[in-house]
């Protein structure tokens, strides 16, 4: 009797299952555990119990959330608590023989940027990190998801994790993306379509010609924001794009041919059944801008701000009214032409070399508009070096952008990189919650090209016009 067709998720889940309890909880083996400076409490928990990490060679640490982006010096971190967290991460790694990518070192960067670029993230792996955007690594065909502080301690101690098996969802995007439309626009269009809770309880597999046509950087952006759709994880089946990307990376498998053989068996089988299916027309997607305080509140740049009267119920109407008040918007206002005060190009969503190239293509030969403060923050030391080798930093500096050191920076504003209250921010990050980029800051999520277009225009504008040579 032949085996029933399986999804990629099911193949990886089964391979990592150690045992399953009667209540449905499954103990899974973890291949890679990535830890940033927020993991101090987990190491302390192990110490209190007299335990040590079970598999130090499968754990990798890096400071990113509290890393300063105006300097590489620990002494320049103004908050002593943040400085202590970075120091603790380094000392914990040293004590337990864990590989640490320290501040100022050549391999430091945002954890979800350095994982793929070092080859730590590979097809078929189960990867966890104490950060919700661990889903990023699924772009390489891995099952990757964020875990809480207690779970971080459990994985450190046992190299395993208890989980309840999620459902599966396939989101298929067919067609050719238009000029000026990127993976960021694709994922914002998806979330606008299914809602911020649309994939709750599911692992998403992205498929279709528009997805396979994306570069690895684009796929990483796509999977990064799976969490904003409510998903537990996001994945793209590994193919030649992934294999070429991984070849020669620092931690790529030594037996490359054997790895390729395993990886090529990972994609979902023909006829595999998903619990939910969603289909979008990639050719109809336009450059997107969020207008509210949830990633689902996104529209094409040519759209207008909706009014509460369009909401389905009284609770939603009240929420929309509160959102519009916070964002300083009124129903019917066009998104195009809305003035910005601050521009941030960076984060684990959009800080890779392709993102910086896209932004530089818009910035080249132009100047940041008067009154706008614009930053570019590379996602890692490696990305920064490559960008500088290509002269992108000179393009940005020449246009009036600040060229900062690698780190999470304004994505979450934990390290002092925040916007002033009431300022309007064009951001390439992944969340636009109230206060996410500073108390009272008004965040609009966009692609790197759209962010650069806002910076040089002084307002949100259709980047396709600038790419065509318009003003």
Image (spheres, rainbow, N blue to C red):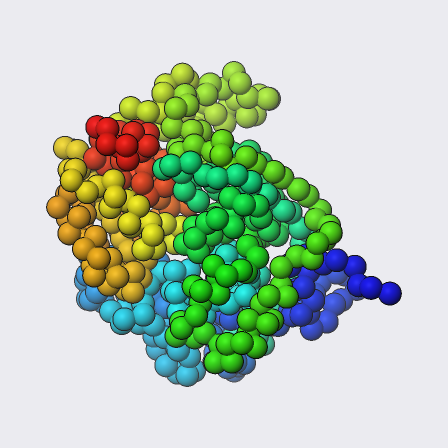
Residue 18 in view here: yes
Q: Position of residue 305 (x, y in %)?
A: 42, 22
Q: Position of residue 25 (x, y in %)?
A: 71, 63
Q: In the displayed structure, does residue 235 sit left or right of residue 385?
A: right
The residue at the point 52 percent across, 22 percent down is 317
Residue closest to the eye, 374 or 258: 258
Relative to 100, say whether 389 is above or below. Answer: above
Q: Exactly how many numbered labels are in the figure?
A: 0
Residue closest to the eye, 319 or 29: 29
Tell me the quadrant of the picture where the C terminus can be found. Answer: top left
Residue closest to the eye, 414 or 127: 127
The residue at the point 21 percent across, 35 percent down is 456
Relative to 431, say whether 71 is above or below. Answer: below
Residue furthest to the right: 1
Q: Position of residue 395 (x, y in %)?
A: 17, 48
The answer to which image quadrant residue 14 occupies is bottom right
Relative to 423, say whether 47 is above or below. Answer: below
Tell me the quadrant of the picture where the N terminus can be found. Answer: bottom right
Residue 78 in view here: no
The residue at the point 72 percent across, 58 percent down is 6
Q: Position of residue 240 (x, y in %)?
A: 50, 61
The residue at the point 27 percent across, 53 percent down is 377
């Amino acid at each position: 009797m032949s085996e029933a067709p399986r999804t990629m998720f099911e193949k990886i889940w089964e391979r990592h299952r150690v045992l399953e309890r009667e209540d449905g909880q499954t103990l899974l083996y973890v291949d890679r555990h990535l830890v940033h400076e927020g993991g101090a409490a987990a190491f302390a928990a192990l110490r209190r119990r007299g335990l040590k990490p079970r598999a130090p060679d499968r754990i990798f640490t890096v400071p990113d959330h509290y890393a300063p982006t105006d300097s590489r010096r620990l002494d320049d971190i103004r908050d002593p608590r943040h400085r202590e967290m970075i120091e603790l991460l380094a000392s914990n790694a040293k004590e337990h023989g864990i590989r640490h990518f320290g501040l100022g070192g050549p391999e430091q960067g945002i954890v979800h940027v350095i994982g793929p670029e070092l080859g730590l993230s590979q097809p078929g792996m189960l990867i966890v990190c104490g950060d919700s955007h661990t889903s990023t690594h699924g772009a390489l065909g891995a099952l990757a998801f964020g875990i809480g502080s207690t779970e971080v301690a459990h994985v450190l101690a046992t190299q395993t994790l208890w989980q309840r098996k999620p459902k599966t969802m396939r989101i298929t995007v067919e067609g050719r993306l238009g000029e000026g439309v990127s993976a960021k626009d694709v994922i914002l269009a998806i979330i606008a379509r299914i809602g911020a809770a649309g994939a709750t309880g599911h692992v998403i597999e992205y498929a279709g010609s528009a997805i396979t046509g994306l570069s690895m950087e684009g796929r990483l952006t796509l999977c990064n924001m799976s969490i904003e759709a409510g998903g537990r994880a996001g994945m793209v089946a590994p193919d030649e794009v992934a294999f070429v990307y991984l070849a020669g990376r620092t931690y790529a498998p030594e037996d490359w041919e054997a790895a390729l053989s395993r990886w090529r068996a990972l994609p979902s089988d023909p006829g595999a059944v998903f619990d939910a299916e969603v289909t979008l027309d990639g050719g109809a997607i336009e450059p997107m801008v969020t207008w509210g305080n949830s990633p689902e509140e996104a529209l094409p740049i040519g759209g207008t701000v909706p009014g509460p009267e369009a909401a389905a119920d009284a609770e939603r109407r009240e929420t929309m009214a509160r959102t519009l008040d916070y964002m300083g918007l009124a129903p019917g206002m066009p998104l195009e032409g809305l003035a910005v005060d601050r521009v941030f190009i960076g984060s684990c969503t959009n800080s890779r070399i392709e993102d910086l190239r896209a932004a530089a293509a818009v910035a080249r030969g132009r100047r940041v508009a008067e009154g706008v403060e614009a930053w570019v923050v590379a996602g890692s030391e490696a990305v920064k070096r490559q960008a500088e080798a290509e002269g992108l930093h000179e393009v940005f500096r020449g246009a009036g952008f600040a060229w900062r050191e690698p780190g999470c920076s304004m994505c979450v504003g934990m390290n002092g990189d925040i916007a002033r209250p009431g300022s309007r921010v064009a951001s390439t990050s992944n969340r636009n919650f109230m206060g996410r980029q500073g108390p009272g800051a008004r965040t609009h999520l966009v692609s790197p090209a759209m962010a650069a277009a806002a910076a040089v225009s002084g307002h949100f504008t259709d980047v396709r016009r600038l790419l065509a040579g318009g003003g």
